[in-house]
Amino acid sequence: MIDSSAVSSPEPARIPRPAEVDLQVSVGTVHLKNPILAASGTFGYGVEFADIVDLNRLGGLVVKGLSIQPMNGAPAPRICEAASGMVNAIGLQNIGVRQFVAEKLPLLRRYDTAIVANVFGHTISEYVEVIRVLEDTEGLAAYELNISCPNVERGGIEYSTDPASTSAVVASTRSASKRPLWVKLSPNVGTIGLTAKASECEGADALVIANTYPALCIDTHNRRSRLGSTTGGLSGAAIKPITVRLVYEAAKAIKIPILGLGGIENPVDVAEYLLAGATAVEVGTAHFVDPRASERLVDGLEMWCRKENIFEISSLRGSLQT
């Protein structure tokens, strides 16, 4: 008779735990828990999405552009659907920087995510004044300088299409700011490396590439534009390959970090931007289809990394093989 007490039970098979995926990145001195940020102009001031999006899951969010005085924006209609994207002419409508500080920023401080203030003006002094108001506050990780605005002091030329104008506005805002300064470039240039280098030389901490592309949608029935302001900016999936190239070209010209922006809808889109040289990305038009697009991308990116055996997302940056 076998003594059952002397027979040891086999140990249960151990199921290996999946390796952790490190999604953390640093844009200069700004540490992000993951490389996914909600882009300015597509996510309101952030707090409007708090009931449907876990803001703490995001790497960060960039608020609507802030001007020194409130702005009503462009006439309606403001949005027109286009093939693989949309054309918009919101006209930088916003509540003004002081109302933002009084009403929105206190609510945003509750969340464990990087809050970035998008800043714009039509004169250099307006840019500086907005930043000076924000400098007296707490809760912001960085400023995103929207330089795709017309410089009224130089006949309406955009700050971002002329390297000299780019240098002037970046230098002035840099001297007014203690926080990191991210400069959002326009794609409407012959060689983006020139404005990228001009921004870097004047103290930009990072670049955001890029803003929307000029576009026109026509209603052939009434022979009018589909937008109240006639022309607008094209965004969405249609622009991604063009903007990925801009990121690649800029990354060869500068050493500061780049945030890629344009047509990001899934983890593969994120990976393309990182391979081209971006450190992080901003998600914009996808929010009009799915308000939770940024949050879902965080989970999707982690799953994609596991599938591809990538355990540090930062290892992708600039690793495009040519």
Image (tube, rainbow, N blue to C red):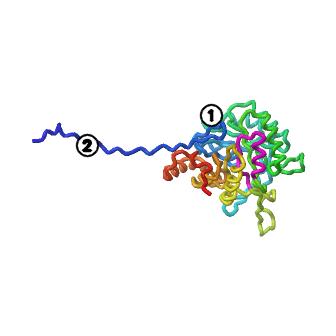
Q: Count residues near mark 2 (Cα–Cα under 10 Å), then give few for <14, some for 14-19, many for 20+.
A: few
- Which x, y percent locates residue 237? 65, 58
Q: Is residue 294 magenta?
A: no
Q: Residue 128 is drawn in which quadrant?
A: top right
Q: Is residue 260 left or right of residue 155?
A: left
Answer above or below: position of 257 versus 140.
below
Q: Residue furthest front?
A: 322
Residue assigned mark 2: 10
Q: Count residues near mark 1 (Cα–Cα under 10 Å), then give few for <14, some for 14-19, many for 20+.
A: few
Q: What label does residue 260 carry, if any?
A: none
Q: Earlier in the sequence, mark 2 or mark 1?
A: 2
- Which x, y percent locates residue 75? 80, 53
Q: Residue at x 42, y 44 (%)?
A: 17
Answer above or below: position of 136 versus 261.
above
Q: Is residue 279 left or right of residue 64?
A: left
Q: Amino acid at mark 2?
A: Pro
Segment tinted magenta in the rendering: 192-212
- Element at label 1: loop
Q: Are marks 2 and 1 in contact (CB under 8 Å)?
A: no
- Which x, y percent locates residue 93? 77, 47
Quarter of the image where the N terminus is located: top left
Give the CA distance from mark 2 to mark 1.
51 Å
Q: Residue furthest bottom?
A: 221
- Element at label 2: loop
Q: How many numbered marks are there? A: 2
Q: Is residue 204 magenta?
A: yes
Residue assigned mark 1: 110
Q: Amino acid at mark 1?
A: Arg
